[in-house]
């Protein structure tokens, strides 16, 4: 087992879904197999406009041959392990590369930096995670939210502190910490605005009165992927989880025919009739997750 870097971009020609699968050609088979049972970091190349750099992590469960594409393989991502970074990490912050394994003996960046799959040392992995989860002002769920563990909300806000890389990863597998990070990235993408009502309400303590909702539910292996998240006010979140409202692929807000007061529901929907969405397309809800919600939650 060992850590690795998987290069991924949203316009990839490969059949990828980072939270679930990573397709790759035979030339990288040995490197990917070396990561089975361990963690990889997703990296978006510098030539991508507004690149996120190192932006997420996940654990590789197994490697299989792609039954639909001869000569191609698929790294299956262990359900529930994908996690976007709270702070995307640039390739060369402060003028020096964070992944030091890509430098050659002369200290220059080598051709290894272009490899779609490459091994990652434990020191580089730890260095990336330290930047990815360095929170001077953590964003925590609002106290009193019924779906947030009480033992977490009662504790003072503290930055992540780790003794070593394995302790760090162990902490990040905690549902409590994952909810905390998921909330931060979703609220940032939606500018702390409810996607359904369009309201951006901040309480007296400076905290957003909006939840980070999973579109495909966690209990059904819904990943902590930004594209599986949506910012919703308390009422909208309740209706969404109970299938009284849903989103079409074009983000039109659908109202269930089983709603007993449809006029009141439509009255709280923003006047466009479509969900407020992040400006960047790669941060908007993925159609596959929206389809899952319509098929399994929405009351037609």
Image: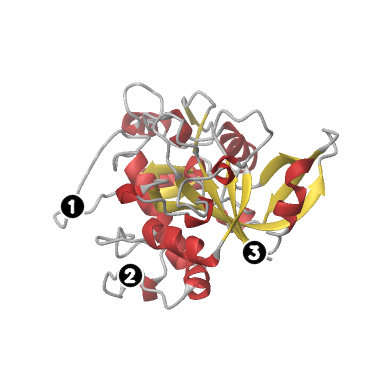
Q: Please state which of residues 261 and 99 is positioned toward the viewer in this rendering.
A: 99
Which residue is label 1 attached to? 203
Badge nearest the viewer, 2 or 3? 3
Give coordinates of residue 27: x percent, y percent: 76, 42
Give coordinates of residue 181: x percent, y percent: 40, 57
Identify the secondary structure beneath mark 1: loop
> Residue 272's quadrant in the figure?
top left
Identify the secondary structure beneath mark 3: loop
Q: How busy is the neighbourhood of tag 2: few (under 14 within 10 Å), some, or many (20 plus)?
A: some
> Residue 131's quadrant in the figure?
bottom left
Image position of 136 (left or right of 147): left
> Residue 200's quadrant in the figure?
top left
Identify the secondary structure beneath mark 2: helix
Q: Please state which of residues 149 and 183 is positioned toward the viewer in this rendering.
A: 183
Residue at 71% x, 60% y: name it: 36
Question: Which circle marks residue 153 in the picture?
Answer: 2
Image position of 186 (left or right of 32): left
**Residue lying farthest to the left in this orientation:** 204
Badge nearest the viewer, 3 or 1? 3
The CA span between labels 3 and 1 is: 45 Å
Give coordinates of residue 92: x percent, y percent: 38, 47
Residue 298 visible: no
Question: Which circle marks residue 2 in the picture?
Answer: 3
Dot 2 and dot 1 residues touching (CB under 8 Å): no
The N terminus lies in quadrant: bottom right
Q: Please state which of residues 59 and 121 is positioned toward the viewer in this rendering.
A: 121
Image position of 121 (left or right of 132): right
Q: How busy is the neighbourhood of tag 3: few (under 14 within 10 Å), some, or many (20 plus)?
A: some
Residue at 26% x, 73% y: name it: 156
Labels 2 and 3: the sequence-earlier one: 3
């Amino acid at each position: 087992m060992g850590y690795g870097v998987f290069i991924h971009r949203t316009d990839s020609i490969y059949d990828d879904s980072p939270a679930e699968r990573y397709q790759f050609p035979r030339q990288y088979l040995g490197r990917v197999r070396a990561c089975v049972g361990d963690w990889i970091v997703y990296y978006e190349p510098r030539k991508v406009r507004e690149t996120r750099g190192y932006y997420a992590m996940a654990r590789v469960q197994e490697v299989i041959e792609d039954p639909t594409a001869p000569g191609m393989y698929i790294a299956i991502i262990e359900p529930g392990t994908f996690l976007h970074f709270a702070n995307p990490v640039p390739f060369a912050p402060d003028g020096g590369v964070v992944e030091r394994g890509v430098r050659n003996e002369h200290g220059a960046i080598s051709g290894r930096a272009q490899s779609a799959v490459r091994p990652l040392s434990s020191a580089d992995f730890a260095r990336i995670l330290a930047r990815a989860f360095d929170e001077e002002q953590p964003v925590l769920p609002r106290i009193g939210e019924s779906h947030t563990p009480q033992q977490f909300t009662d504790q003072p806000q503290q930055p992540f502190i780790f003794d070593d890389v394995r302790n760090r990863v162990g902490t990040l597998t905690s549902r409590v910490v994952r909810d905390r990070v998921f909330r931060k990235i979703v609220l940032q993408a939606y500018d702390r605005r409810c996607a359904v009502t369009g309201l951006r309400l901040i309480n007296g303590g400076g905290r957003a009165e909006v939840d980070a909702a999973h579109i495909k539910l966690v209990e059904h292996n819904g990943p902590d992927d930004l594209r599986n998240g949506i910012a919703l006010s308390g009422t909208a979140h309740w209706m969404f989880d109970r299938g009284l409202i849903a989103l079409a692929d074009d983000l039109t807000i659908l109202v269930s025919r089983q709603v007993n007061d449809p006029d009141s529901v439509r009255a709280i929907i923003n006047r466009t009739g479509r969900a407020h969405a992040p400006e960047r397309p790669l941060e908007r809800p993925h159609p596959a997750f929206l389809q899952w919600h319509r098929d399994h939650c929405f009351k037609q």
